[in-house]
Amino acid sequence: MSGDTEIRNGRRLALALLGGTMLAGMPAVAIAQDESGQAADQPTPAPAPQPDTIQSIAVTGAQRLEPQTILSYIQMRPGQEYSQAAADQALKELYATELFATASIRNNGGNVIIDLVENPVINRIILEGNKRLKNDKIVPEIKLAPRQIFTRSKVRADTARILELYKRQGRFAATVEPKIVELSQNRVDVVYEISEGPKSKVRQINIIGNEVFSDGDLRGEMVTKQSRFTTFFSSNTSYDPDRLAFDQQKLRQFYLTEGYADFRVVSAVAELTPDKEDFIITYVVEEGERYKFGEVSVDSQIRDFDSDAMSQSLPMKGGDWYDAKAVEDTVEQLTELAGRFGYAFADVRPQFRRSKEDLTMSITFVLNEAPRVYVERVDVNGNTLTQDKVLRREFRVSEGDAFNSIGVKRSTNRIKSLGFFQENFEIEQVDGSAPDRIVLEANVEENPTGELQLSAGFSSIESFILAASIRQRNFRGRGQTVGASVNYSRFSRSFNLSFTEPYVFDRNISTGIDIYRRDFNSFNFRGGDRNTTFEQATTGASIRVGVPLSEYMSLVGSYTFNYDDISLDENQFFADFDGDGVRTCEPLLAGRFLCDAIGKRTSSILGATLAFDNLDSRFRPTRGESISLTTEFAGLGGTERYIRLRSRGAKYWPVLGNFIFSVQAEGGFIKGLKDRGPGVDDVRLNDRFFLGEPQFRGFDIRGVGPRIIRTPLVDDDADPLTPRVPTTNEDLISDDAIGGTGYYLGRAELEIPLGTGARELGLRPSVFLDVGALFGVDTPNLQNFPNGVQARDADSNLLFIENVDDGNGGVTPTQTTNPIAADLVTPNTPLILPNSFISETFLGDSVSPRVSIGIGVNWNSPFGPFRIDFAHVLRKQPGDDTKKFTFNVGTQF
């Protein structure tokens, strides 16, 4: 076999050499013929190949799109010359539409055929595995949607966007796996399988280069916190690149405030641990030298301001440590000062002169010249229901007035406080028809002002609560308020109709009227059970008129008429112990103070309230003060006569960043003006003050102040010669709070900020300290009968177990024989009234402060506001009732 192969290869080589020789000799023969002048017949050369001309263009594979529509996407047309470059360009144009999965072009003798596979249509977008980020947070952020054309580029973009959303939540270990489920008719479901992974925390924050301030001090200035047990409820322990940049700015602000003008952050690096669960952040800083203020002055280019006088009033002086925050505040104050005098466009620019030799920073605040501006016009836009005058009467600047920035700001706050419009309302300033003219525009978006509430809840005070109310806060667009409400619980029922007109006859005078009926069941405690005592039904009406005394102070006068009907359960507290056939309130059963309270009476009350309020919010204040003083006099008619004083005050301010600290105090005093006889207090029981839950946390309902403890005396051994002793069975001991004529109560509370997630849930925890007392009643007539009360007849004669007629119309005790000495006779046992072996003790009437501390949480839950408190009493008085845990659901607190 190998020999035959070699012979064949040799023959092929010989033929190749012979062919080459013949071809090499052909040019020589041709040249020789030309030189001899002999013409030879030569063939005509063939023409060069010409490009194909497109005769037709056909489309195959189209399902949803018409061929003519597809051809409109490309520039290739019949009659044009076909080339590979033209085909490539057509393919680019087809793929650019993102309608096709694949496309190819082939030329068949001038007949161009375009083969296509269309991209499918999306049937559904499905998210699986997402628990921390719900669908309503992800779907708006992705591009693909049902009935759109599916493209892989959009899937990749959506996958990256979902991962970015999880990174914003601090979940850097999250993964997204897109999957395609093919359906009939060229449709697909796009499924994003999400593995959220753990939240990536900031394990450690390292700071390099700081010498003056410790790492702890600097970490305290940052928003980002290290993940520790104490920061369990904070969302600031997760890594956020934006927060990292913000923390660098916070560090710079802190150092500039402390005088380190050359401070800079050299680098800030966040490293993700290999398990992608934590971050380690490292800052490299340069503190630089500390500066002091040099020469500080004001250069006013406005003639109305004296530069020297303004320089003297600057808060910083030469030699003080440099403080960038003080500089910013000064710029703001000078701008605001210019705005007060009508210079709306005043420009204050601080000019710095730094001296590295003596480490001073000299500053000149240049108040550049600006025209004085006047309000040309006030425009109100966007109100469809609310009348223009409702907004215009809240403006503190009028057309033609000199511009006043404080007046504009106050106008904005007053319109916001109406509650009729959007929360982010701001009065816009627009250039007027001249450089010294400005137009103020109130562009409002009206919010619904009608309220219909139906609610049910549970309270440790009232048990079950049912409430219904309807209110319109902008009745007929005039700013009037009308409302009706009904409340029902185990111990109280009420009905109320109200109307308020804030501007009577378009004058700054407010009026209002309330008509109400309130049924209230008072109670005491017998052991751990609540026991109804007296029932009070109050029917009345109140009229009030208010006038402003200044921007923040007002005076409100009121007149109230009440008809009270107080009664006791006759089956429980009435008896005929005198034997005259008439059942009356029996002090042995009810107590003297309850018997004194029953009856029908009327109260005609004239009141006045002086109030100051500059809080930044009526619902959740964070800054400002509120003070009120109320005086009430009952005696202009009616059966009751007293004077009552009450005062309240509160102050709020932010501390330590986002913490809100508040101090509240209140107190009251009532003096009866009608002598009700010896041993009876001049102030009736239902007019006194009571203190306890919910006002005073840590104490039970009416758990603070004067009270009477009624203890039954029992004969444990049934021996008639042994004295009775107080019972130890708490279920038989009653505790009656009788109120006081004076009280005071103070609260200090620190609201703790939580992370974004907790804020969205409406959680607001706080720590508190409560101090208060209730006092000021006359010592009541106490009942103390260790031997019981002997029954007597209508003539005060003693009654015995057995009695005989003495023949003269009277009775005489039945005589019995003494078994020890037969010659001695003694009367039988006197009759003892039932339940008369009692001992009463008066406790709690002391001005000595009671003190409690604790923690609480407010929660705006979906089923109503919720408040829970855990309190520990540090100081109390004998008789006070304490309570560690209280809560309220479904009612205001």
Image: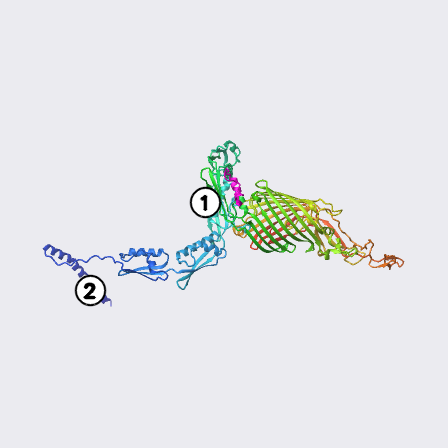
Report the magenta residues as a range: 389-412
Q: Where is residue 505 in the image (x, y as percent from the top left)?
A: 57, 44
Instruction: For marks 2 and 1, give the CA distance.
Output: 81 Å
Which quadrant does the N terminus fall into? bottom left
Q: Which secondary structure lies at badge 2?
A: helix
How crowded is the residue under tag 1: few (<14 C-alpha within 10 Å), some, or many (20+)? few
Residue at the spot of label 1: 267
Q: What residue type is labelled 1?
A: Ser
Q: Which mark is residue 220?
A: none
Q: Is residue 421 above or below residue 145?
A: above
- Counting other residues with Cα less than 10 Å from the Cα at mark 2, is it few (<14), some (14-19), or many (20 or more)? few
Q: Is mark 1 on a helix, strand or loop?
A: strand
Amino acid of disc 2: Arg
Residue, far bottom: 1
The extreme right residue here reads: 823
Reading the image, the residue beneath label 2 is 11
Could you say where residue 79 lies in the image, as x and y percent from the top left?
Answer: 27, 57
Residue 563 in view in this figure: yes
View extreme (front): residue: 505
> Sequence order check: which comes first, mark 2 or mark 1?
2
Q: Whole-percent x and y of residue 615?
A: 57, 44
Of residues 804 and 843, the one drawn nearer to the viewer in this rendering: 804
Question: From the viewer's perspective, is 211 left or right of 486?
Answer: left
Check if residue 80 falls in the magenta segment.
no
Q: In the image, 672: left or right of 39? A: right
Residue 847, can we see it?
no
Looking at the rendered image, the disc whose residue lies closer to the viewer, 2 or 1, is 1
Horizontal and vertical percent position of residue 833? 78, 56
